[in-house]
């Protein structure tokens, strides 16, 4: 029996629903129904004010990441918070749900989206993958590290080695902090099995980059392990570009 056969059996047993509107998905759909997927695609029409490319084709990072030896950040869309707590925006729901629910179709969807950007942006020679680790208390609460799951899915599909390099020492959840508080809270440590990254490039995965505090702190440690380059890749950013964004974008 094929893997596709078991996937179909699992689909009909679980009958997954759209993470945004709750509509039952058909077997060709992942995470989002056709209507919500179209709305998500619209959210990707955001332009970087530094290079004037779509964010999904842009490698620009922010000032903090540049100062932490990460001049390249691959991303897909800009997260836009809503003032209406009842409003469900498909792009935002991808970020919200992946942190709380370990759904294989959602992990596949997000990893596929990030892979498109990776393939269009960088030469993968000498790259290995790792991720910005989740706070331990959140892993215990939800039962998984979402960024690790995404990174592993990407590594498998691209045929690149995944290496778990870091563990989080953060005392508080980053989403509850702002500005300098996020920077001070973003603490990580090397896992006991120290890796030799000499001559390697590391593709560092996370779901969302807000200020760059967590990704920047992780990148500095990874460079100290001998990596010659660290490139960030995420689904979304929340920070604004260094220059004023173009009106409407």
Image (cartoon, grey):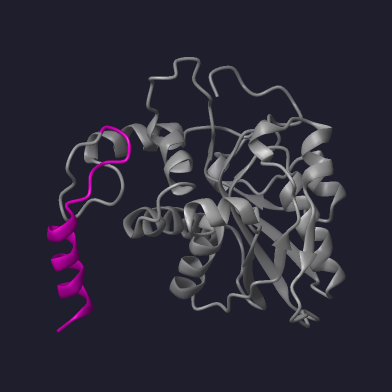
Q: Is residue 17 magenta?
A: yes
Q: Is residue 50 magenta?
A: no
Would you identify the image quadrant in which residue 136 lies?
bottom right
Q: Is residue 167 left or right of residue 224?
A: left
Relative to 229, does residue 29 appear above or below in the rendering? Answer: above
Relative to 179, does residue 209 appear above or below in the rendering? Answer: below
Relative to 231, does residue 172 appear above or below in the rendering? Answer: above
User: Which one is in front, 77 or 182?
Assistant: 182
Please tell me which residue is depicted at 28% across the width and 52% down the height of the picture. 30
Q: Is residue 74 left or right of residue 77?
A: right
Q: Position of residue 155 (x, y in %)?
A: 51, 72
Chain part drawn in magenta: 1-21
Q: Position of residue 63 (x, y in %)?
A: 82, 40
For the C terminus, the quadrant is top right
Please tell me which residue is depicted at 38% across the width and 21% down the height of the picture. 87
Please tell me which residue is depicted at 40% across the width and 29% down the height of the picture. 89
Residue 195 appearing in the image: yes
Q: Is residue 104 left or right of residue 155?
A: left
User: Which one is in front, 152 or 243?
Assistant: 152
């Amino acid at each position: 029996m094929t893997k596709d056969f078991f996937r179909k059996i699992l689909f009909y047993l679980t009958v997954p629903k759209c993470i945004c509107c709750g509509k039952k998905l058909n077997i060709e759909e992942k995470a989002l129904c056709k209507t919500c997927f179209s709305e998500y695609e619209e959210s990707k029409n955001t332009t970087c004010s530094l290079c004037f490319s779509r964010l999904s084709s842009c490698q620009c990072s922010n000032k903090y990441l540049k100062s932490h030896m990460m001049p390249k950040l691959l991303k897909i869309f800009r997260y836009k918070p809503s003032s209406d707590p009842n409003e469900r925006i498909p792009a935002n729901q991808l970020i919200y749900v992946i942190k709380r629910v370990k759904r294989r179709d959602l992990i596949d969807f997000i990893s596929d989206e990030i892979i498109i950007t990776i393939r269009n942006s960088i030469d993968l020679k000498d790259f290995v993958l790792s991720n910005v680790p989740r706070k331990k208390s959140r892993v215990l609460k939800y039962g998984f590290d979402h960024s690790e799951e995404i990174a592993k899915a990407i590594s498998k599909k691209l045929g690149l080695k995944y290496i778990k390099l870091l563990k989080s020492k953060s005392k508080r959840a980053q989403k509850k902090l702002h500005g300098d508080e996020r920077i001070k809270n973003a603490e990580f440590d090397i896992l006991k099995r120290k890796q030799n990254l000499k001559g390697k490039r590391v593709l560092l995965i996370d779901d969302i980059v807000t200020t760059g505090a967590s990704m920047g702190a992780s990148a500095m440690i990874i460079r100290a392990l001998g990596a010659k380059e660290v490139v960030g890749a995420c689904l979304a950013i929340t920070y604004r570009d260094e220059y004023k964004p173009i009106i409407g974008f």
